[in-house]
Image: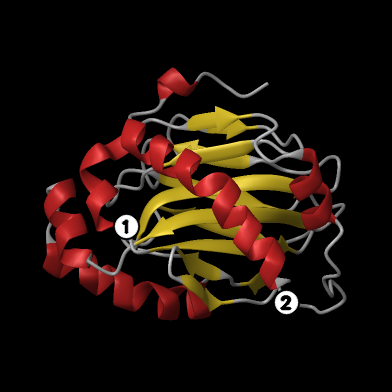
Amino acid sequence: MENNLSNLNYNVKVLDNFLSEEDFKELCNLKIDQSSKEEFKILHNEINDKGIIKSSIDENLLKRLHQNYHGRAMNILKQLNEKKLDLYEYSDFSIIVTSKNSKFPIHDDIPNKLLSGVVYLSPQKNSGTFFYNDKKGSNKTNINWKTNRAVFFSRKERETWHSYEGDGLNNRVVLVYNLVSNKIKDVFKIENKNYFFGNLRLKCNPYIFRIFKTTI
């Protein structure tokens, strides 16, 4: 079981059996090349009610995922941060393969993500998601790996710290489900955070991660 979520300074929702059996099996059976030496392999898929924006998986599957879970995700966002609901523009359904020996450092997610979610797909056992109260890793809380378990939170600048990694034995395959907006200034206003410094972090972090394998 996961550690006590009350130790955290922000809310995290854990939902077991999030996907229908049909959707879960189809996602798990996707043919993904895991033979490359990439630390993190990402298959991006973007969609909204107007249609598909970008797809790297079967388009019918992507449409079904959006149809089946959009309302539920919006309701979760309403519970976690209702003020961000009106900023929604599209959904990102990404398959992420983390190689067994790779680790993504403690970070707080980019401001574009109104709602951040992950659904554990495969294998049967792996490493879950770790949440903290600060970037130093205080009050480490592990949401243990369980297939078809979903973990959601609404990011907040320099507060919703988390990380993930492979277990050293097998690649870690997840569905990342984010509700997204490009209205960054509005996001920082709702979060009562400084847009200038937040946007500077947003632009610098990809380069810092590429070189130093960390973020600021």
Vertical placement of 2 versus 185: above or below?
above
Q: Quadrant of the C terminus?
A: bottom left
Q: Is residue 65 left or right of residue 75?
A: right
Residue 157 in sight in this render: yes
Q: Is residue 89 left or right of residue 153?
A: left
Label whose residue precedes the other's in the sequence (2 or 1): 2
Mark 2 neighbour class, 10 Å CA radius: few under 14, some 14 to 19, many 20 or more: few
Q: Is residue 100 left or right of residue 185?
A: right
Residue at x-position 65% and y-position 36%: 18
Q: Is residue 61 or residue 96 the one in the foreground?
A: 61
Q: How far across and how far down the image is residue 118, in percent?
A: 59, 48
Task: State the CA–CA distance, disc 2 to disc 1.
Answer: 31 Å
Residue 96 in sight in this render: no
Q: How far across and how far down the image is residue 104, in percent?
A: 58, 59
Kindly identify which numbered label has been placed on residue 16: none
Q: How far across and how far down the image is residue 176, in percent?
A: 58, 55
Q: Quadrant of the N terminus?
A: top right
Q: Is residue 209 or residue 4 the one in the foreground?
A: 4
Q: Is residue 130 or residue 41 the one in the foreground?
A: 41
Q: Amino acid at mark 2?
A: Glu
Q: Secondary structure at mark 2?
A: loop
Q: Nearer the viewer, mark 2 or mark 1?
A: 1
Residue behind mark 1: 88
Give yes or no for contact between labels 2 and 1 (Cβ–Cβ under 8 Å): no
Q: Amino acid at mark 1?
A: Tyr
Q: How far across and how far down the image is residue 175, in percent?
A: 65, 55
Q: Is residue 62 left or right of residue 200?
A: right
Residue behind mark 2: 38
